[in-house]
Image (tube, rainbow, N blue to C red):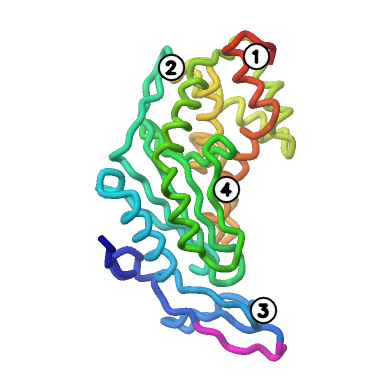
Amino acid sequence: MPLDFTSNDIVPDHINFPVEFEPTKYDKSKYVINGDTGEYLGIVGSTFKCASHGDFFTRAHNAISEHLGESFCDSMNISFDAARNNAWVKMDMRMPNVLRKIETDKHTTTIAPRLIALHGIDGSCSNQVYYGAIDFFCTNGMVTGDYDKIKRKNTSRFDLETFIDELQHTVSDFHNTADVYQKWAETKLHTVDVKALLDTIITDSDRKAQKMFSLWCQEVSTRGCNMWSLYSAFTNYASYADEKNGFTLKNTNNDTVATSMWSREQEVAKWIATPQFRRLSELQTGQAA
């Protein structure tokens, strides 16, 4: 049965505004304007078109709710993060009704599916939808690269029909990903020089690699010395920016916190796709790392 939620039901008022355009003095560009406040948000090409945040997120939400069903989406938690004066918005949907336990020899946690939709009205990003999971023990968000195959739209239009087709695999994808996580939880790293390993994975900053090793040690004290703990250190970095984990963000006063944290999630997806990280799973079968 089709759902009739409107943007007023789903999207917060401060991002639920009409998008307007105004020509610049250069005939091949135009201004993007917040239709409620009159604020100029950016400059795009003269042929640029986009839906409002309200329209895009409402269509995505209703498609997810209708095609995954109540058993999956009932009690769904939705949050929004915005940047670039609300020109860039992320919708984070978490489904607590579908759960899987991940158990190490020291710790048990529960994860649930997560869908992330991105939308930009200033040309800063295309319409994108990602699939991941949320760890309820620490509320770390997970977007895990090839293991749960990120769903993304790199076109200027949101292809709703293609998106609906991809949704059919969401539940099975989640359980397949949870199986991988459980294998990571069972993969011991006692024989691995994790500090040296991190130096080969995190190559853009020695300081970042050092701080990640400290975060890994914290995770080991809770979850044990295993591959899941290393991944949890990565996702902690992507979920928090505070003194506790050592990865604070610089205050640039440029309204970039949300985009910076999303960039970290993409960074983690790249780290776990490296050959160095993937080879760790071979330890479980007795092969060399």
- 37 and 29: which is toward the camera: 29
Q: Which residues are magenta?
A: 20-27
Residue 22 falls within the magenta-colored stretch: yes
Q: What residue did someone put label 2 on? A: 104
Query: Of the residues under marks 4 and 3, which one precedes in the sequence?
Result: 3
- 56 and 262: which is toward the camera: 56
Q: What residue did someone put label 4 on? A: 249
Instruction: State the mark number for residue 45.
Output: 3
CA–CA distance in space, label 4 to label 1: 30 Å
CA–CA distance in space, label 4 to label 3: 32 Å
Query: Of the residues under marks 4 and 1, which one precedes in the sequence?
Result: 1
| Image quadrant in which the C terminus is located | top right
Query: Of the residues under marks 1 and 2, which one precedes in the sequence?
Result: 2
Q: Which dot, 4 or 1, sits closer to the camera?
A: 1
Residue in the image at 56% along x and 33% along y:
234
Instruction: State the mark number for residue 18.
Output: none
Horizontal side, residue 200 vs residue 272: left or right = right
